[in-house]
Amino acid sequence: MSSESHSFEVPSDPSRLPMTLPRLSEKKRLGEPIVMVTAYDYPSARAAESAGVDLVLVGDSAATTVLGHTSTTPVELDEMLVLAKAARRGLKSPFLIADLPFGSYEISDEQAVRSSLRYVKEAGVDAVKLEGGNEMSVARVRAVVNAGIPVMGHVGLTPQTSTALGGWRAQGRTSQAAAKIAREALALQDAGCFSIVFEAMPSARRGRDHAPHGNGRDRDRGRAVD
């Protein structure tokens, strides 16, 4: 028998054990707050770690907030990997999610799985996020989940395809539009998404087909639900 001894680092605060999907589900079941923030680099990840957040997203909004682009579409997967690696080095406890950028998953299920595997293997992310709830996006979610990688969905304002949505504007402002988003969210749930971001959607209905207008400028903000 080996006489080699092993030491294990036990957090002084048990609540700071690494966040996992089962722990997130338990927090939701108990009605406990779940906190998610965006981080693009090591310093912002360290701030998130110190604040005790539950989930950290490396958003493709880095294209506009960090890299100087006017939209999210130009950012490449290789650039996102650099940012995800930096964030990973700054985190110990939060669950790390990274955006699949435009052009890294649309072509085929195989492309989506390949891009997601790179995130996991090269940057150590815990999950990926992709936009949209149409048939293509649902198929990509199912393929990535089947490959063993958790996926966060994203409906409402999807900046990667904002041109097709009429620009950066609130979505779901009529009963028909809201019903369409609800169907997309349910399809993503059925495909295996562990959570879904609802971005730039009215917070309350007013009348039959009217709701407050949002400006769509708060990137990577919305409700994440199980």
Image (cartoon, rainbow, N blue to C red):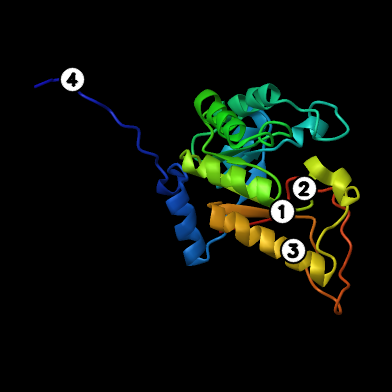
Q: Taking 19 as reference, is 4 left or right?
A: left
**Residue, disc 1:** 155
Say which amino acid is labelled 3: Lys
Callout 4: 10 Å neighbours few (<14), some, many (20+)? few
Q: Position of residue 87 (x, y in %)?
A: 61, 30
**Residue, disc 4:** 4
Q: Nearer the viewer, mark 1 or mark 4?
A: 1
**Residue, disc 3:** 180
**Distance between the alpha carbons at the discs numbered 1 and 3:** 10 Å
Q: Position of residue 26 (x, y in %)?
A: 45, 59
Q: Tags 2 and 1 in contact by the CB under 8 Å rule?
A: yes
Looking at the image, is mark 1 or mark 4 earlier in the sequence?
4
Say which amino acid is labelled 1: Val
Q: Nearer the viewer, mark 1 or mark 3?
A: 3
The vertical placement of 60 against 226, above or below, is above
SS at mark 2? loop
**Distance between the alpha carbons at the discs numbered 2 and 1:** 6 Å
